[in-house]
Amino acid sequence: MVQAADPDQKYYDALDELSVLPLWRVEESNQARSPATIRPYVWRWADLHPRLMQTTEVVDLESGAERRVLTMQNPGVRPLAGATHTLTASLQLIMPGEIAPAHRHTMAAFRFIIEGQGGYTVVEGEKVPMSAGDLILTPNWTWHDHGNEGDQPMIWFDGLDVPFVRSLKACFYQDFPGRQAQPVKADYPESYERFGAPGLLPAKQRPSTLYSPLNLYKWEHAYEALQRLQAIERDEFDGTVLEYVHPLTGGHILPTMSCYLHGLTGGTHTRARRTTASSVIHVVRGAGYTVMEGQRFDWADRDIIAIPPWCWHEHVVAPDTDAIFFRVSDLPVLEPFGLVREEAYKPNDGHQPLDGAS
Ligand code: GTQ
């Protein structure tokens, strides 16, 4: 059947010619009233790890890829990359003796080390050693290359603000001349020597960068601080939570991403909440499940959890194991514009009814 022509169609066609839309006809979804497209998701280490090791058969760092990286793709962002609409989360592998050549980009990055020893990142000439549980920053436009002087594969979790920077069309990228490592100016983690002591700062050296001047947050300090705080404080939504901060301002570690360490004791069941900030969690250790929008997502050691914006979520930890989460959030890009909203789930003591398992 032929539809009766809209008497105003000519008018709308004329607007189309002008590349203009009548807002009253714009679909609600187009107006982004709810950021519903990003899906709650869990990537399992048991699936990812063998595929990461197989990259050694598929690409080499000498002549092939610059980085051996598998990046999580939320089904809601296809065909682009992104664990959420603002954050990328990836696993990177570097084999003994390999070099991942230096480059820099306007996208900020950090690495949370998962396993291996003898690996390092050079950040602006500073050689930063990697140990499991360490957090290493390579902020916006800092030269960085990686290497592995050990005899084991070195594996870490990469977090970047790529989709956010992409949305602003502010992506710039540069290779270090000669596809090689940058010259090392300090063969020790100089920024840690300067800024790594708790509550103490050099009296005369206070850089004014937006990002933290400390490139290495060691696991031993983070873990000790978590245990100490866990002994005296617990939040019903977050367990016990520490933020990795800029040592000069006490603010977020990077202007686009904030990083946290959560301790959740065995048997914990947090209250559900939703927030406009999206998060990605790397499960440092532990087992349990997260309920997101009524759906149960099981997780275990080293799994990666995507929590979309405005998605109800609560965590349940298995009774016999304590859990530790490393979490990255896009909160810093929402705060300056008054776009942070949070809501606690009120019914049923703060726990969502379960629709089913993932
Ligand atoms: O190690 O420099 O996961 O440039 C994505 C882009 C890691 C890196 C990623 C990168 C890197």
Image (spheres, rainbow, N blue to C red):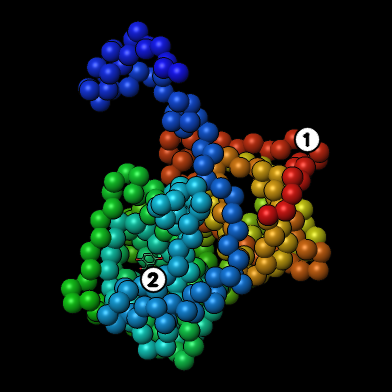
193 w.r.t. 151: above or below: above
Determine whether the beta carbon of the residue marked 1 sits less than 8 angstroms from the nearest atom of ligand 1.
Answer: no
- Which label was assigned to residue 37? none
Left or right relative to 46: residue 354 = right
What's the residue type where badge 2 is placed?
A: Ser
Per the image, label 2 sits on a secondary structure element best described as helix
- Please tell me how crowded label 1 is: few (under 14), some (14-19), or many (20+) other residues with Cα within 10 Å: few
Q: Indicate the position of residue 53 as horizontal and vertical percent values.
A: 49, 79
Name the quadrant of the N terminus: top left
Q: Is residue 96 left or right of residue 36?
A: left
Does residue 246 appear in this view?
no
Q: Which residue is mark 1?
A: 347
Crowd class of label 2 (few under 14; some 14 to 19; many from 20; radius 10 Å): some
How far is mark 1 from mark 2, CA to CA? 48 Å
Q: How many marks?
A: 2
Of the pair 150 and 135, the residue shown nearer to us: 150
Q: Nearer the viewer, residue 322 or 225?
A: 322
130 left or right, relative to 143: right
Q: Secondary structure at mark 1?
A: loop
Residue drawn at x 54%, y 39% as measured from the top left: 36
Left or right placement of residue 166 versus residue 3 in this view: left
Residue that appears at 32% across and 14% down: 9
Residue in front for this viewpoint, 239 or 58: 58
Q: Give residue 333's quadrant in the image.
A: top left
Q: Amino acid at mark 1?
A: Pro
The residue beneath circle 2 is 191
Position of the C terminus by quadrant: bottom right
Q: Residue 136: which quarter of the image?
A: bottom left
